[in-house]
Amino acid sequence: MSLLSELVIALLAEFVDGLDNAAAARVELPDDLATVLGQPPPEQPTGLPALLDTVRQAADHAVETAGPRFFGYIPGGGLFVSALAELLAQTLNRYTGLSDIAPGLVALEDGVLRWLCQLFGLPPGAGGLLTTGGSMATLSMLVAARQDRLGDSVPLGIPRGATVGSAPGTIYVSEQTNHCVRKAARIAGLAAAQVRTLPTTAELRIDVDAAAAMIAADRAAGLRPFLLVATAGTTSAGVIDPLVELAALARRHEMWCHVDACYGGFFQLTERGRQRLAGIEQADSISLDPHKSLFLPYGTGVLLVRKISALAAAHTDDADYLPDLHGGALPDFAHLGAELTRGNRGLRLWLPLHLHGVQAFRAALDEKLDLAHWAHTELSADDRLEVPYPCELSTVLFRLRGSNTRDGDNEAFLRRINATNRVFLSGTRLDGRLTLRLCVLSHRTHARHVHEAVSIIREFVESIP
Ligand SMILES: Cc1ncc(COP(=O)(O)O)c(C=O)c1O
């Protein structure tokens, strides 16, 4: 076993050591390699060195999402210590769906969740669930909100093609809301017409007055608005919706208020972040993605709920083959989410938080705010570029200046920047125009990487006619 572990750790050490200078992306997968990778398992064993070589080759063909040059979408990085925690969790292989089966590791995971509830100012009675990501957290939130506000008595789904007038329960998002909410609604059986899209202001925030008017009109028309989703750090622009006003609006209409803080949530650890996220403590639920702003490896999401009993009401069921629960103080995670069998997800947060200390995360997040602010200032000063939005968190948006600039020009601009293979940026559509994004969020990204990204952007502005 130790020889096997040594080989794996040696590969990982080499990989991590090489990240600083690794190509930003290498996504073409050669046909012959694809054929090798798709082979079925053989009857006879293969040596680990050869298999690790195959894994390394497979991983090499990818956007380097673990590296410091990844500024696309929403980076995270993947803390190595968290991966070690995962190795521990998987080897210990404790069943943490029901607290009676592994009370120790459930207590540890519960400790992480209670710390998070405290961080976001949620009151006693709050609790949460660690999920695989923001999308799964959103799905559980949505069914809990529906159960809590509408109960079982209201017909929930409406036939395909039905008009909004026949939809009893409606939810409210904006065009900047992550599409996982719309997807969760569909999975949960809501029709498209039950998802209402609120207008946004010129700054891309939900327009509170327009939201109030739409919700009031929907109620007057016989609909039952039950969920309002605000975002604390939108995916495209990193913008924070007016959390205090939206919580008040939801309260007035007895709606569940959810804050999607998957991107921006962990900036709550910093002084600046706390100020910008003021009002989040009033939410009925909050979704977070430690695999974004806590730098953890992919596969770690969080749902925090003000009234954990509401999450339990939507997910608890019993079965003859399940043990009689002692009804103790520890949560039964299988009764708070969709999964019955689950491993321990707490260790992947607990180990890095305890080993590095919370201050290390606070400092890293402050560094990302500073770096993004610096890039925003630099790009704003370049009169060949248009920088249309402020940088509220760590996303900088820019495009070629000029009213006659076409999407094709900005597309070519993005392609040329990424073709250097020194950085990877992504684009999005804002005001109907393709806009480039530089999102600073990997724990491995430091000043030298952001400086290089900005000089590459400057260099290629010239190349577009
Ligand atoms: C604001 C926001 N919410 C939710 C999600 C979905 O989370 P996940 O990809 O972890 O399922 C994302 C993903 O980028 C996001 O940016």
Image (cartoon, grey):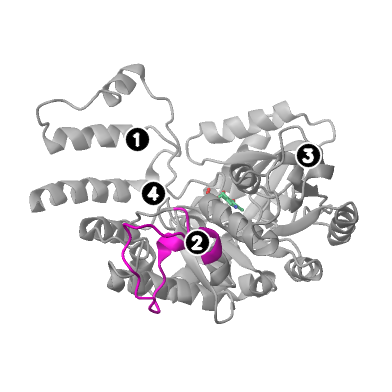
Q: Earlier in the sequence, mark 1 or mark 4?
A: 4
Q: Which mark is residue 60?
A: 1
Q: Position of residue 239 (x, y in %)?
A: 70, 57
How far apart, in angstroms, are the residues tagged by discs 2 and 4? 29 Å
The local secondary structure at tag 1 comes to helix
How far apart, in angstroms, are the residues tagged by discs 1 and 2? 29 Å
Q: Nearer the viewer, residue 378 or 4?
A: 4
How far apart, in angstroms, are the residues tagged by discs 3 and 4? 32 Å
The local secondary structure at tag 3 comes to loop
Three-letter amino acid code of the residue under disc 2: Val
Q: Position of residue 455 (x, y in %)?
A: 58, 45
User: Residue visible at 66% across and 53% down?
Assistant: 234
Residue holding disc 2: 302
Q: Position of residue 199 (x, y in %)?
A: 83, 50
- In this picture, which residue range is highlighted in magenta? 312-338
How far apart, in angstroms, are the residues tagged by discs 3 and 2? 40 Å
Three-letter amino acid code of the residue under disc 4: Asp
The local secondary structure at tag 2 comes to strand
Q: Which mark is residue 401?
A: 3
Q: Earlier in the sequence, mark 2 or mark 4?
A: 4
Q: Earlier in the sequence, mark 3 or mark 2?
A: 2
User: Residue visible at 64% across and 68% down?
Assistant: 284
**Camera-side mark, 1 or 4:** 1
Mark 1 is surrounded, within 10 Å at the Cα level, by few (under 14), some (14 to 19) or many (20 or more) other residues, namely some
Dot 2 and dot 4 residues touching (CB under 8 Å): no
Residue holding disc 4: 20
